[in-house]
Image (cartoon, rainbow, N blue to C red):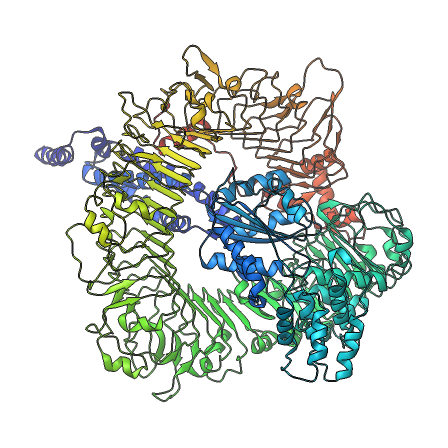
Amino acid sequence: MDVFVSIVGSLVAKAAEYIVDPTAQQLSYLFKPRSKFLNLRTKVQELKDARERVQQSVDSANRKGEVIFDDVQRWLTVVDEKISEEAATQLQDDEEKAMKRCFAGFCPDFKSSYPFSKKADKEAAAIAQLLTQKDNFDGVSRPSEPKGMDTIRSVKEYEAFESRRDAFDGVMAALKDDAVSIIGVYGMGGVGKTTLVKEAFKQAKEEQLFNEVILVAVNQTPNMLNIQKEIAEKLGLEIHEENIDMRATRLHERLKKEGRVLVILDDIWESLDLRALGIPSADEHKGCKILMTSRSLDVLEYLNSQPNISIETLREDEAWNLFKKMASLVEGSEFQSIAVEVAKRCAGLPIAIATIAKALKPKKNLFEWKDALRQLSQPSERNFRGIPKDAYSAIELSYTFLDAEELRPIFLLCSVMAHDADPEDLLRYAIGLGFIHGFNTIEASRDRVLTLVSDLKASCLLLEGSHPNCFDMHDVVRDVAQSIASRDLHWLTSFKERIDEEKMKKSQLISLQNTEVSELLPHELDCPNLQYFSIGMKKYSPLKISNNFFEGMRRLKVLEFNEIIFTSLPSSIGCLKTLCTLRLRNCDLEDIAIIGELKKLEILDLRGSKIIVLPKEIGQLTRLKLLDLSDCDDLQVITPNVLSKLSKLEELYLYGSFDEWKVEGIENPRSNGSLVELQHLSGLSTLEVHIPDVEAIPKDNLFFGKMERYKISIGDKKWHSYYDTAMKTSRMLKLGMNKSIHLVDGIKHLLKKTQSLYLNGMEDVEEMRMLYHPNVETIGQLRFIKVDNCNTMKNLFSFSVAKRLCQLEGLEVSNCKNITELIEEKEEIDDNDILEFNKLRILKLYNLNRFNGLWHSQNTPPSSTWLFDKKVNFPALEILKITGMVNLERLWADQLVEHSFSKLTSIELSDCPKLLNVFPLSMLTRLQRFEKLVIRRCESVEEIISEEGGSNSSSNSSSGMPSLSLQFIQSFEFPNLTSFTLKDLPNLRSIHHNKMHTMNWPSLKQMTMRECHRVEIMFANSGETSSQQSLFWVNEVNFPVLEKLNIHKMDNLERLWADQLVEHSFSKITSIDLEDCPKLVNVFPLSMLTRLQRLERLEIRRCESIEEIISEEGGSNSSSNSSSGMPSLSAQFIQSFDFPNLTSLSLWNLPNLKSIHHNRMHTMNWPSLEEMTVSACHAVEILFANSGETSSQQSLFWVNESTFPNLHHLSFGWNAGIKDTKWHCQGQRHSVSPYFPNLKVVRLSKYPEQVTVLPSYLSSLPNFQTLEIRQSCFKEMIFQSEEGGEEKPASLLLSQITELRLRYLPELMHLWKEKEGFPNLRILHVLGCPGLQVNLVPSSVSFRNLVTLEVWHCDGIIKLITHSTAKSLVQLQQMRIGSCENIEQVIQGGDDDDDDEISFPQLNSLELVYLPKLESFCSSDKYTFGFPSLQFLVVHECPEMKMFSQGHSNTPMLHKVRLNTWSYEQRWEGNLNSTVQKVFREKHPTTEECENFREDQSKPSTSNTQNLKKEVENFVKDQDSYSTSKEDQNKPSTSNTQNLTAIMENSSTSNCE
């Protein structure tokens, strides 16, 4: 009994120890451990689900080549730790310990339950925070930086002619003039308009006049979709919408976010609808400028350009000087008098001068020059499209002077190709037409074509393309070339209204690209002389061609179709017995067996087309030399022995396509293609192929060694189309074998000549040691090496091997756990022997945990802790990236090779926990080209520049570098550094601790600092000291061109600016972003305002100490400001101040903010402000005030007509201090109409339950167009009018709005009840509104103007809209319905209606995804449906959808149904209903169907289309895909309203329960 009392007493004492704080939470740790662990397990499962969704989004982004955000990658890393097996095991152990009981199980063990329960609770809270972070992700990726604009044709051909100076200066002045929005440049073709605006483009970028500069060629036949696509790509914007208006809207929104942007539209021939393209007007976006070129002043004036600047022809002396330079004439030569006359005949056009000068340059005889002048003196009678006769004749004469036999036809052929043409396309045309003579192989012909293209560039008849390895042609030269081809060869390149049958009979070439020709083409073309026929549609669309179409063109040699849907190829294609080249690019194909009848075919190009099976008939093409099946990602079957029959095949392209290679001997007979078949192709020299299973490589594989051009990957991973672009060469090999197998002889032969080598996941492959074996045969052709996840490697090269890598340009090593050094010194070498990497430009080292340095000698222990020393020379290195080097303490040794690293432009360092600093002072003289520095998560770094290594003068002298010693250095700078990023450096204090050194940053444009909590004075000047902490404490340090400043999570930052700043420092800043700086009290002193004339964007988030944005502190000391060279700003003298260029202002979660500036004697104007966000600023009193205005009433805005003249977008979150957003408008208190004339978009968020009505001011906005409400508790869309009185429905009072977006409104019961609600609505998005019941809107509602309808996560809706509402949707173009648990039908039928037709005449896109109860689009058989424009239909995860509709559906433009949202899996069974029914049967087969399916699998395939499909359909895979398919971002949640409410709670909103 005493023992029992003793035990119980100790337990009670322990319990009492833990319940000193008698809260329910503390007690729950003692008595409810089970609930704590149950909650934790629930959270872990939620986290696993969330991680899966994020990973799917990341995978999708990777497939698109996008860049994953750093915070998303870090989130995934942390989550992986939380849900790892180790964490699960730990959880199990902790739970068992928490549940321990004592005294025979009668009493809980408080000593165990308390700490482990508390740990579980803390872990659950951490997971909850991770889930909140996931909800706050604004996407997971961004598009990669567009490359197009930086790679446009060089403007090296620009000549600064005196006669052009005024024109160029006029363009630049207009670009700098804020009052000018559209600028025109005009002049005749070839006069140099494009060259001049490209020079302006270059100058504008150098002077940082714009955030973005975009140049797009419009050309004579503008393709709006292509122009939009090019603009989007150069902005890094991905547009999926096909509808041109929706694409324009996306572009419009994106361009408005860019601040200052210049769009150059080159070569406009006729009026262009800029708004339809998506380019905002000056009224919509003041910062957007447009620069246009045209041959016609009328066109420019119609587009309202002003000024319009004329480009005249060159003066006579300028023309002569240019001609003399291009022809390399020496003054006083015997040709001079003739040459002067020739130059005059070129009409002062640079393009004509250049071409004729280049043509005459090799002519060495006087009679040749005289003959040229004689021909030019008899100019062509043609005045072709505004080209002067003399200029036409000059270009024509240049064509005549082309010497080589093939040059003239190749030049004319180039004229029918698009801009930025690929020589590979030219090759395939030229071979087909027989323009290349005397060459027996494709490779030899390719070399010849590249030589001819080079010759034409040298003759100025071709230009460099804007992308690598492409070529282009000036429009004037193109016009002349097409004119010659039309005149002499009867080539036809366009027709618009009718076909001239006589011309067609004579024509040898017809090229109709980007032309809608479906209505113009007759059933049969009578073209007996036609050799080349090419059609490309403006968009992926069907083209109906009769079976007899080709019977009248039996001499055809080249046939090409682009982006066309074929239900079947015309039977008359079999008549083309002379066809040599057939290109069906990006086409939708079914049965292509008829191609087997084309016995003379040498080139078959099906790149990017949708085909399922390569039929056996292709094996009949015994003359085929090139087969291109690249990117045919639907190709599942290559009929056995087809490839082996192509005995003449030289080039085979299968990358991004078929990879289901069968292992020889496993199946007999084989059901698919095998690599064994390639053994029979003795002439095969080019191969692009992915081989997932190394076992599929045949034993006799020496054919690999014969390859001269190849792109081969073996193993799980393919070459990535984006991330591996930099490694693109003509010989690429990727090895990813993760099991022990010997490298076959053929692969060894490939290694000897490989230029790009990628080793991935090579775990136990002994032969990979050949890379650093001393006796390795030559690998001197390697230009790029990438090694990833090869954990058996300890070194990469031996010294002798590394010395042979004289061509190496790029080296990347990552995730190799055991690698310690890159280079191992096994041989005896001289102490002075230096390893030279003379061409290495890129070095990347990632996650090498045991890495000690580049170098290791067997004779000395690896004691060094630096990366680079005097043994290795990197004279060409430009980019250095290092991540995850846990042992790295220093980058540089004291002694380095002279000139090593002198070309370095970029360094990125991440996750190097022992690294102390980045540069010693001795390195600074090597960094004159340095442009970019990024340092992340290096927790030991205290300063960026250290004195270590700089004091030893002798050591530096020995390296050939000038000595930098502390006592002699007064200042230093990075003259070309433009970007500077420091993130997560907890011990960083400053750039350099010694404040006696002055630093200058003359080129710095972007600076980002994040989570550098110990930073005191980051940038200090010589000798300055202060007790107050400021980020910039400088009066001699200059930031003259800094544009973007981002400061995030700086715990100790109190001030940004000191009182004294260098004159003009920070005067070009355009963007400031502040976040999570808890001690920061204000943003700007008054003394800073004159420097902020260019500020365009200001965002401040979660800075809890900020009370005002502008303070008077620092502005009262006039002397200090005077000394800085800036005019003094003092409170008593300032009456008003502006932010003249500020376009975006965001104030979010600033709990102590009271106003912009507390002194209301100052008037503030915001003339350019377009977007403003104010949210969770609960202490705000009067945010914007006028001079002298006072009022006892609390108003957020106290404004006059000049305060916000251009405000377009206004976003309000709930601000507790403001019960309703109040406005005090000078002179008129009851209407905001005159004071917000351009306000079009209002967004409301996080309004709590106590707010039952919408803000009253909405009804007074004269141009209100878009309303978005999110994460709020409104039950109805009503508000009280400003005059007071009864509540009125928003749908009537806001009748003018065109766009309504409702997101996460769990309490919303209905959108509106009124028949005429929102009559002008064009876009309606409803997301996360589970309170909506039965129908989206009442049956009386009409949507006669609606263009876009999207509904997601609305689980109360059963039938989306009634038939009467559906009949009003005559303008609807896009409908997307997803993740609505209970929707059964989209259209609800009436009970008593007669038969009727419901038509959607404009609908082109319909998506139905994740609708588990959807049975059909409409179940009533009383309606027929018309979809005349529908081309895109997705039906994904709708398992109960047995048919599309009971009534007939007419879909003339629809030929495929997409079965998921992330890939191109499709079906088509002749019509829509049959397709949906077939898919349903595949998901829900009967027993009989299963048996029939298995029988079908054993039958041999035939050429019949349906049998081919059956051969490749995998029923079991489809069955599994339904039950285990990956969720995407739109998949419904399982907890509906609770989850939606949780989202709101996690976003710091009030509880709506």
Give the residue at x 19% y 50%.
Answer: 1119
**Residue 1029 seen anywhere in this rendered image of the structure:** no
Q: Which is more toward the observer, 1436 or 425?
A: 425
Query: In this view of the protein, which residue sits in the foreground, 1204 or 148?
Result: 1204
- The image position of residue 414, as x and y in percent, is 73, 64
Residue 1203: percent from the left, percent from the top?
38, 32
**Residue toward you, 1076 or 166:** 166
Q: Is residue 64 left or right of residue 1013?
A: right
Name the outermost residue toward the left. Answer: 2
Indicate the quadrant where residue 465 lies. bottom right
Q: How many marks?
A: 0
Left or right of residue 1308, residue 668 in this image = right
Which quadrant of the rendered structure holds the C terminus? top left
Left or right of 699 on screen, residue 642? right
Percent x, y for residue 949?
25, 74
Picture layout, residue 182 above or below residue 22: below
Residue lying at the far top of the rendered structure: 1285
Examine the image and state in which quarter residue 125 appears: top left
Give how far across and how far down residue 169 sits, in percent. 52, 57
Q: Quadrant of the N terminus?
A: top left
- Asked if 1254 appears above or below 35 in the picture, the reply is above
Res 1532 visible: yes
